[in-house]
Image: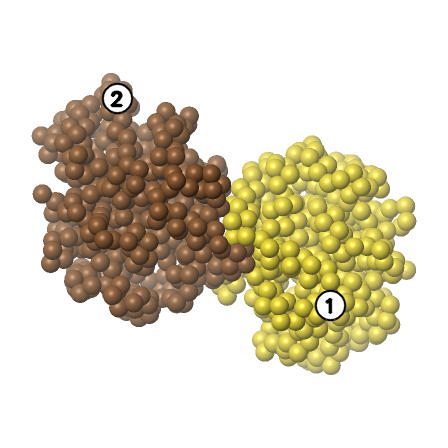
Chain colours: A yellow, B brown
Amino acid sequence: MKDTLLDGSLEAAVAALRARTVGALELTEAALARIERREPELNAFITVTADDARRRARAIDSGRVPSSLAGAPIALKDLFDVAGIPTTAGSRLMATNVPSADSAIAAAVFTAGAVNVGKTNLHEWAFGVTTDNPHFGPTRNPWAPERIPGGSSGGSAAAVTAGEIFGSIGSDTGGSIRIPASLCGIVGLKPTYGRVSLRGAIPLAWSLDHAGPIARTVRDAALLLQVTAGYDAADPVSVDVPVPDYLAEIDDGVRGLRIGIVTGRFMERLGPADRATADVAAAVQAAVDVLAGEGARLEDTELPRSDELQTTQLFVIGAEAGAFHKDRLTAHRDGYGADVARRIDTGLTRTGTEYALARRTRDELRRAYAMVLNEWDAILLPTTPTTAPLRDGEDAVAAAARLTAYTSPFNLTGLPAISIPCGFDTSGLPIGLQLVARPWAEARLLRIARAYERATRWHERRPS
Amino acid sequence: MKDTLLDGSLEAAVAALRARTVGALELTEAALARIERREPELNAFITVTADDARRRARAIDSGRVPSSLAGAPIALKDLFDVAGIPTTAGSRLMATNVPSADSAIAAAVFTAGAVNVGKTNLHEWAFGVTTDNPHFGPTRNPWAPERIPGGSSGGSAAAVTAGEIFGSIGSDTGGSIRIPASLCGIVGLKPTYGRVSLRGAIPLAWSLDHAGPIARTVRDAALLLQVTAGYDAADPVSVDVPVPDYLAEIDDGVRGLRIGIVTGRFMERLGPADRATADVAAAVQAAVDVLAGEGARLEDTELPRSDELQTTQLFVIGAEAGAFHKDRLTAHRDGYGADVARRIDTGLTRTGTEYALARRTRDELRRAYAMVLNEWDAILLPTTPTTAPLRDGEDAVAAAARLTAYTSPFNLTGLPAISIPCGFDTSGLPIGLQLVARPWAEARLLRIARAYERATRWHERRPS
């Protein structure tokens, strides 16, 4: 029964925990058993903190304070500090980096009653999309172990997909929450820039980094966003905007809402080999039909200045990642994987002029996108142009360019974006639908995603 | 009588114009006559647009629509576009740059009924503080023609001080509104970053540039801010924050307001030769006593991370100015003055890494300063450590480092700051008092400045 609960929603688990149908320790033991069973294949975790999890679960079982997560097992991507446990950021150079304080994210989920069962695997330093980690081994896609789970939050997505945990908090600098959610057939939400504190998180690129939930249902993602969103003066880019009740309108449906279907140059700017496959395009078209059937008003729309997106993102991420890694890469080049070292080396060649122009272009893009988004409740497009690629033979840098093409523009522009499952390709691999809204409109995004989810069964299908 | 009006406030001129005691054309002719008389010495203007001014004045005289500036003569710093008139930015390379549309600033003041009599001189490309312009000649300080008026908005400040115009809009990237206001004994206000649109203004450094009023009284500055403040979607860094009525609380006094006196490392970080002179320190101390006498509660305060300010400002301004000028400087090096070319050359050496770290440090400083400002209605310090230096013998780059030391931190942090006259040194040169408030609190700043002004007579003293 506990094991069955593991494949249900976080929300159902919280209900069972609150009703004391199951105890936090019982459920934690079930999760730890699932982890023990699945990890040899999946390798979704860098660190499993069984004793710490049991301690937290016992405290919750013996406590009387109701909390919103009520003892449900989760795990954090291994670039968020949890006091007393190493934060590796997916690098063996950080194996002895044991923080003394919780990150804002960790403090928030612990306060909400989550039981942390470990730290999940990621692309080294979060700088890539394969999660083929040279230090801690590759995470495998639960749908097809020879395929990547996406990244950089690949461990989080694989663990959530396989029912090892009910949810995770990942980070997203160019798509690192949404891409693995897409390739694993689950839900990933990148909130508005500044919505969730990054205090105590290891940066990839300060001006593009976002933290957000990875979960199996839209309501679960809302629940995790609810406990982690909010202003934090200690994060210099956290923004003081009121946090709404994300569940208040989530089941209100889409009747009358206006949704723009992204078409034109934005979708076509990649080489023909890198565009959305026929399976992906068909699944997204079917999703359009579902939303229309639910009463949404859908029309084609275009996004401006598409040819400037890739360079701007590359220059910003390159200069900022270069700034963070320069000294360490110089001192410990042999401690870096080849693809990450190559990307940092490229970043280090950026001049101040190039980065300054990229920052200015980014300010302009942010405004231009906001103007478009003001016209719509959300816009809609695929999350990734393809389903999960094979791990072998995939070049990590090329994969990043292709798989981030539809996601990274919303890091540059700081807009909230969600990926939800919308079908399967002819090989049985999941396809992700991406919805994007205006700044701070996560609640609207969740409402549309939830309406789609309610009208479909894709989220119920799990890998065998 | 018209000539006497020219030495009064903008507010008094507007009242006279509304009462039809004087006509817009009459007052404009008086201003043009004053300009003709004073320009041979002052050289405050790059372009005088007499015909255009007369045309606008006639239209106002014949119109029936009341407007807030009612036909008062003003002039814009020559980096704000006015349709049909060259925008030189103080460079002869731009002598044929004739815009077809008004800048946001120009459109705003024209809509409010201002009569533009010309474009004021500035430090070449706004990149310096002497306004010793190699192409259009030096602007002279109305208090002492052998001295600099400060800059880069030196022409605006000299013209306002000499009664050639009632007010001007300048720009401020490291102090370019406040420094000339301080050295000329008038009022200069740099609003919060994003408060006034920079559409149609030639940039110096996008992330540090601010536009704001230069005037002879605090209420006049408020009047000019009122007509220019507001969100503009066409300026990508304009922020959508409601604009209050800046005159509503301006005369409410300072009883009970908390004002922090900046002390410690922030004031001491410069070399001993570059710190506030005894005259400046004494005048600021006397201002503290005046404000205390008016009922304000004043206490010492310190600002954080003072040793990081200079480098951060230099790296940001250097990389951004470098980005804007790189191609032009390469193609037309002989069209640049020596000091500006030297500063751009230095800016071009900045790496992407240096600029990225500076931007991150700046985000942290902005938050750290906001935390301090949350404790105070305003903080108080000198605007410039010295009064106006002699033009000859002054190295422009060294002058910029010294004269911006107390102003540029509030460009980095985007905080609103005002300079008001607070006395004279033993040579009879004006001294400026600077007040700084939390983001968007220009109204509070104006109220404190106005209370001080009302309690003193410094603003009434004019150069002979």
Left-right relation of B294 to A166? left
Q: Position of residue A199 (x, y in %)?
A: 56, 66
Q: Residue at x 25, y 60 (%)?
A: B385
Above-or-below relation of A132 to A278: below
Outermost residue on the front side: it is B334
Dot 2 falls on a residue whose secondary structure is: helix
Look at discs 2 and 1 and give the one toward the viewer.
2
The residue that disc 1 covers is: A120
Residue B7 visible in the current orientation: yes
Q: Residue at x 28, y 30 (%)?
A: B47
Q: Quadrant of the N terminus of chain B?
A: top left
Q: Position of residue A352 (x, y in %)?
A: 52, 53
Q: Position of residue A311 (x, y in %)?
A: 63, 46
Neighbour tally class for label 2: few under 14, some 14-19, many 20 plus, Cα within 10 Å: few
Of residue A12 and residue A272, the one placed in the foreground of this image is: A272
The residue that disc 2 covers is: B51
Dot 1 falls on a residue whose secondary structure is: strand
Left-right relation of A416 to B292? right
